[in-house]
Image: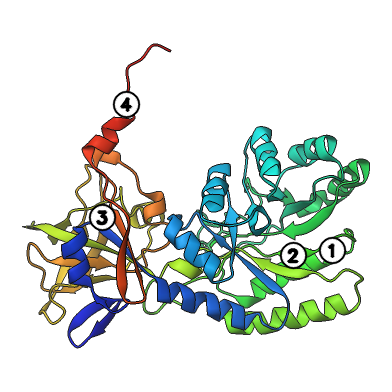
Amino acid sequence: MELHQGTYRIGGVPALDIARRAGTPVYVYDAAIMERQAQRLKKAFSGTPTRFMYACKALGNVAVLKHMRSLGLGLDTVSIQEAEIGLQAGFTPEEILFTPNMVSFTEYQRAVGLGLHITIDSIPVLERFGHTYGADVPVCIRINPHIMAGGNERISTGHVDSKFGISIHQLRHVERIVATHGLRVEGLHMHTGSDILDTEVFLRAAELLLEMADHFPQLRFLDLGSGFKVPYKPEDIATDVEDLGQRLAERIRAFNAQREVPVELWFEPGKFLVSEAGVLLVSVDLIKQTTATVFAGVDSGLNHLIRPMLYGAHHGIVNVSRPAGKPRIYTVVGYICETDTFAWDRQLPEVQEGDVLAFLNAGAYGFSMASNYNARPRPAEVFVKDGKPLLIRRRETVEDLLALQVEQAL
Ligand SMILES: *Cc1c(COP(=O)(O)O)cnc(C)c1O
């Protein structure tokens, strides 16, 4: 969203026009920002063959998936349902990676049936997979390198107690299973969490995978997952993808020079591609002065954007209706009957009832984590592409909520 001659615009369209036409709350996504981010990644890694699989759990609307495919990206899915939606959006099975955690073997069998790339992240599943498919279906193995990514325990997946991946210390065990069943290991995978600040952490992870690669002669790719950090606060540091791309590409080129089968680099960015592209537009329903603060209550809540309450995440807030208003301090809260705070003591241009506010960086894990808590319908979604806003999901209604509720003999 940019402020242009006193008016906030999304992909060139005035944000207030979108709020008026679609109503609030509404998620709005800017296709051009997704494209910019995708091009940035592709350019940064142009030094070595690299594939980017968009992690659609960040934002799974079919229109967005189609856009990602048109940008030349594959798809990373963590459930069979995401994969099915990906196929609906036009991805071929070869373009889809299935990277679930703690799912039933039946779900893996369905993924094999669809022809997806399969990532396995536990010893028992690897063993059963080998027993069932042997050399017929190639696999990618998810390793837990025990590298801590970022400082946030709740979004780091690489620590010792993590439920993700097969411990790097179980490599011998993995090798025995692979040898016993003649498994074809086509990829090694590592995703240590969603907030890697430091290129060094990526490089260390890559080094570990490269060391292991020697044990798997049929390897075709190294998947470094994601972890591309995006700035949420103005002072936040983002991952330096250009530096990372250059250094990793150099390392992979050197590695491939002495290898019979060259390896590709794969990544699974979610947040990096869609976070900045999205805003959640809400309306202010009530200004309430208490002894402690001034609350601005909006027509949304943790049911629509749970990141502040779940992760303590910071989202920038903009008063779309009054960009030049006098600055005052507000605590912005939602309408859910729980502690439901978007931001404490945030300075905003004077807010009046009826104003439209925008939560920034809401493209990733916004709508995709939304729920119907308090029987609140989920928001509409709008996609702005080539200067045109397109409704890509209509707002839910109470009828939608009731439609699935039945009373029938079981
Ligand atoms: C969530 C997830 C991603 C995407 O992470 P972002 O932080 O959104 O980039 C990638 N790979 C796997 C396996 C994931 O679970």
Image quarter (top left, top right, bottom left or bottom right) of the C terminus:
top left
Q: Residues within 10 Å of mark 3 (few under 14, many from 20)?
A: many
Indicate the amino acid at tag 2.
Leu
Q: Position of residue 379 (x, y in %)?
A: 28, 52
Q: Position of residue 279 (x, y in %)?
A: 31, 66
Indicate the amino acid at tag 4.
Gln
Residue at position x 62%, y 46% from top? 100
Which numbered marker is on residue 213?
A: 1
The residue indicated by pointer 3 is: 341
Indicate the amino acid at tag 1.
Ala
Disc 2/disc 1 C-alpha distance (Å): 8 Å
Q: Are marks 4 and 3 in contact (CB under 8 Å)?
A: no
Can residue 168 be seen here? yes
Asked if residue 348 lies left or right of residue 263, the reply is: left
Q: Secondary structure at mark 3?
A: strand
Asked if residue 318 lies left or right of residue 313, the reply is: left
